[in-house]
Image (cartoon, helix red, strand yellow):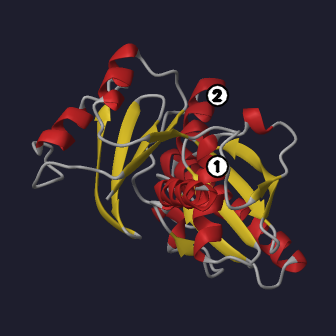
Amino acid sequence: MKLIFDIGNTISKFFLFDGDTLRAHGSEVGHSLSIVSQLLDGTAPEVDAPLCPEAAIISSVVDLSAEAEEQLRRLPCPVLRFSASTPIPISNEYRTPQTLGTDRLAAAVGAWSQHPGCPLLIIDSGSCITFDLVTPEGAYVGGNISPGLHARLRAIDDYFPRLPLVEAEGPKPELGYDTETAIRSGVIEGMRHEIEGYIHHFKAKYPQLLVFLTGGDELNFADTIKSAIFADQFLVPRGLYYILCYNKASKQKQK
């Protein structure tokens, strides 16, 4: 069993892999990693027995607290801390690798590990929507960032006093029939056309392009985008898992 931690700004997530199969996953608010104790003693609701992982990896966008570090020391296995200097199975051509979000790089690895040798476009629709490209040679060449679904809805409310804050859930007609549906459909349809535009652009360069869609809002687009895609909400933890396996195999070869 391999244990994956993905620490965001407000939520800490864990994923448990048995081979290539994701067996369990869960989350907790904050960064204390108190879930480690529950996993080890078998009281976490996502597991039915005490956990004894053989290896672990952690990716975090925040500095870990003393409490979190203490929890990690309880693990009966080495913990790989994913950073810009961590060896990965693809090359990273980003000019400032230290500023590249580890989630973007992990998602690229997750896609490449499933389809090596193919050109890949990874679209992550979350707080921001990111578009990242991996060449057939396995080179991550960079990507673009634009506001995500909820950021766009909030921006309309913030910058236009007479327009309301609209929830993402609700009717989405082709053309809005009132202000609420005009905003919701305008934002979501705009994002869909943006995504399809990127896909069309890179398929012109790479006819064999494979497209991965992930992130918290991927289901808003997976069923409506006309181009064939792979929708995988676990692409980032899957990439972290492959990075962990890659580093473990590298160390074994060095012995």
* Quadrant in the picture for residue 250: bottom right
Q: Nearer the viewer, residue 91 or 253?
A: 253
Residue topped by disc 2: 160
Characterize the local packing of mark 1: few (<14), some (14-19) or many (20 or more) Cα atoms within 10 angstroms.
many
The picture places residue 99, in percent across and down from the top left corner, at 74, 33
Q: Is residue 82 above or below residue 225?
A: above
Secondary structure beneath dot 1 equals: helix
* Quadrant in the picture for residue 67: top left
Residue topped by disc 1: 104
Q: Nearer the viewer, mark 2 or mark 1?
A: 1
How many angstroms separate mark 2 from mark 1 (CA)?
A: 32 Å
Q: Amino acid at mark 1?
A: Arg
Q: Is residue 191 above or below residue 8?
A: below
Q: Is residue 6 above or below residue 221?
A: above
* Left or right, 15 with reference to 121: left
Q: Amino acid at mark 2?
A: Phe
The picture places residue 200, in percent across and down from the top left corner, at 80, 74
The picture places residue 204, in percent across and down from the top left corner, at 88, 78
In the rendered picture of this protein, how many numbered marks are placed on residues?
2
